[in-house]
Image: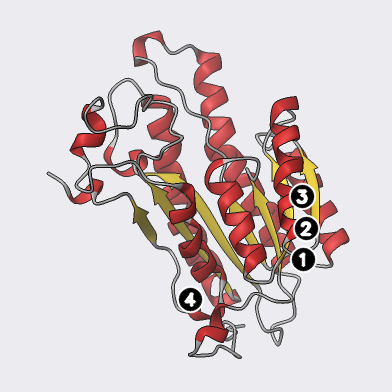
Amino acid sequence: MTVANWPDAKRSLDAYDLSGKQALVLGAASGAGRAIALALAEAGADIAVCAATTDADEAFALRKTAREVRELGRTAIERATDASSGQGAQVMVRQVAKELGRIDVLVNAPNLFLGKPATKTSDAEWAKVIGGNLSATFFACRAAGKEMLKNEPSARARGRIINVASVLGERGLANAAAYCAAQGGILNLTRALAQEWAAQGITVNTIAQGWMEDSPALDDITPEANQTVRFIPMKRAGRSDEIAPLAVYLASDAAGYVTGQTLFVDGGLTVHL
């Protein structure tokens, strides 16, 4: 059955109001995930802040994000799992859906980078990078999609899925084959799921971030010291809070006819020859 996407959509700034919506943000401990979690909370959503690993440092940072969400007056719950495991992702999503009542928005922002020549990348490293990025994104999408499809066709929305990837999924980079392969997979996963779920009221899009201030490969981010930054038309690295407003748009009523897209936030990097 074909259902209307968010039939109560508005044309004013009210269209960006996420009050009453429930969001799960995977990778919310830092970077884009943290910034998006806070932006969705500012827009009115309650948030499940989730870590894609059970690492102790990530869990500590996740608690900080949850505290910041609560300071904005929103509900925040915390979950940590090995998202590269299908069972782990499924259990996490079910727990969140039960506690929040439903999941309206899923944001996937795991970001496990590996900078290493292909000839020196081990089988274990390849599996870890693919698992921590592409598999984690797929497993979370699969589990959340099942929850979103439980919504009645008459509901105001079945769901929004926003995957956060890297421009390296589009352009590639030497000495980062595993990471680039995982990111490219996320871009095409988005396109496939968007087609699969569009008629059922779920939109799926990707935000592809460029070189950010916290990118592990950048080190010194000043253009005088970093040739990579000099290559960016804007001559600076990006900030995570510059990604978050786009995520709010994609999660909102205003984006009801946007699906299957990869939207670049990269300071012009991908259009620079």
Question: Is 82 rendered above or below residue 145?
Answer: above
Residue 70 is marked as 2
Task: In the displayed orientation, state which residue is furthest to the right.
Answer: 99
Q: Say which label, 4 or 2, has the lower sequence index.
A: 2
Q: Is residue 65 left or right of residue 204?
A: right
Considering depth in this image, is 107 or 215 the residue closer to the camera? 215
Residue found at x 48% / y 11%: 122
> Label 2, label 1: how many angstroms apart (C-alpha)?
5 Å
> Label 4, label 2: how many angstroms apart (C-alpha)?
26 Å
Image location of residue 115, percent across then percent down: 40, 20
- According to the picture, the residue beneath numbered tag 3 turns out to be 67
- The amino acid type of the residue labelled 3 equals Arg
Residue 42 lies in quadrant:
bottom right
Residue found at x 70% / y 36%: 61
Residue 89 visible somewhere in the drawing: yes
Image location of residue 158, percent across then percent down: 66, 74
Q: Say which label, 4 or 3, has the lower sequence index.
A: 3
Quadrant of image for the C terminus: top left
- According to the picture, the residue beneath numbered tag 1 turns out to be 73
SS of the residue at dot 2? Answer: helix
SS of the residue at dot 4? Answer: helix
Task: In the displayed orientation, state which residue is furthest to the left.
Answer: 273
- The amino acid type of the residue labelled 2 equals Arg
Considering depth in this image, is 100 or 87 the residue closer to the camera? 100
State if disc 1 and disc 2 touch (CB < 8 Å). yes
Residue 82 visible somewhere in the drawing: no
